[in-house]
Image (cartoon, rainbow, N blue to C red):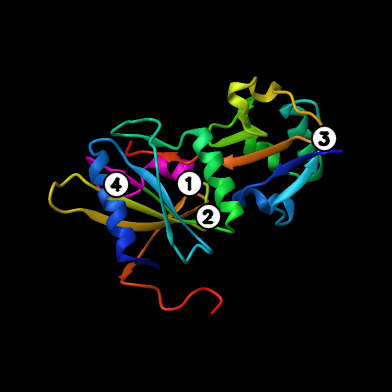
Amino acid sequence: MAITVSIPTILRTHTGGEKSVEAAGATIAEVIDNLESNHGGLKSRLVKDGVLHRFVNIYVNDEDVRFAGGLEAKVADGDNVTILPAVAGGSR
Amino acid sequence: MLVIRRDLVEAIVEHARRDHPDEACGVIAGPSADRPERFVPMLNAARSPTFYEFESGDLLRLYREMDANDEVPAVVYHSHTATEAYPSRTDVSYAGEPEAHYVLVSTREPDTHEFRSYRIVDGEITEEPVTVVESYESSPGE
């Protein structure tokens, strides 16, 4: 069994248009490295200077990984990982 | 061009007025980016006059709901409460929906408002005309 990763519209150029891809790994960092090996270019959209980019949210099942160890958050086979663009902004 | 129903424009403006002086935010979901139909006001987790953000749990629930309904975020709106309705550098850096219409409402004047729409793709802002209609001509797929 693998980990299912939901890819947001803005990153589907890296997955040939696929909404959902499979990946492997025991942590989010490993899942991202595994994604990068199959879908080059994704990692730099998700990670900057060794931390999760502030413009994206990554969830393991229902939990935002920022509250679960960040890139070290644990992932198990059968989990769903969801990547979403943060919706934010402001007048400054 | 953004074609949008009058009741949705009114709902966005009312939300912006209600939350003033904090920024208000939300989406209008629809079956395609050119068919805004379902008004979804969101809580501004930043509760700030100069910043807005969807809370991360709310964001996940919203996207799951849209996925289940076969919807996309046709419009992503927020208000500027002391400046013009034009995307800031922060707005552009966060803009993660290349197909959405980014609507900005300015509530800096108490009696009048600005309601403008933009596409934001690869960091580039393109303003687009807004056409307000009473109802859409036909249902998608008809």
- Mark 3 or mark 1: which is in front? 3
Q: Chain of mark 1?
A: B
Which quadrant of the figure has residue A18? bottom right
Q: What element does badge 2 sit on? A: loop
From the image, tell me which residue sits under label 3.
A24
Give the Cα separation between the discs numbered 4 and 2.
24 Å
Q: How many marks?
A: 4
| Picture layout, residue B102 above or below residue B56 | below
Camera-side residue of A28 and A44 = A28
Which label was assigned to residue B15?
Answer: 4
Which label was assigned to residue A40?
Answer: none
- On-image quarter of the N terminus of chain A: top right
From the image, tell me which residue sits under label 2.
B98
Give the Cα separation between the discs numbered 3 and 1.
29 Å
Neighbourhood count class around disc 4 (C-alpha, 10 Å): few under 14, some 14–19, many 20 upward: some
Q: Chain of mark 2?
A: B
In reply to whether residue B80 is colored magenta, the answer given is yes
What amino acid type should be assigned to the residue bearing mark 3? Ala
Mark 1 in CB contact with mark 2 (< 8 angstroms): yes
Magenta stretch in the rendered image: B78-95
Q: What element does badge 4 sit on? A: helix
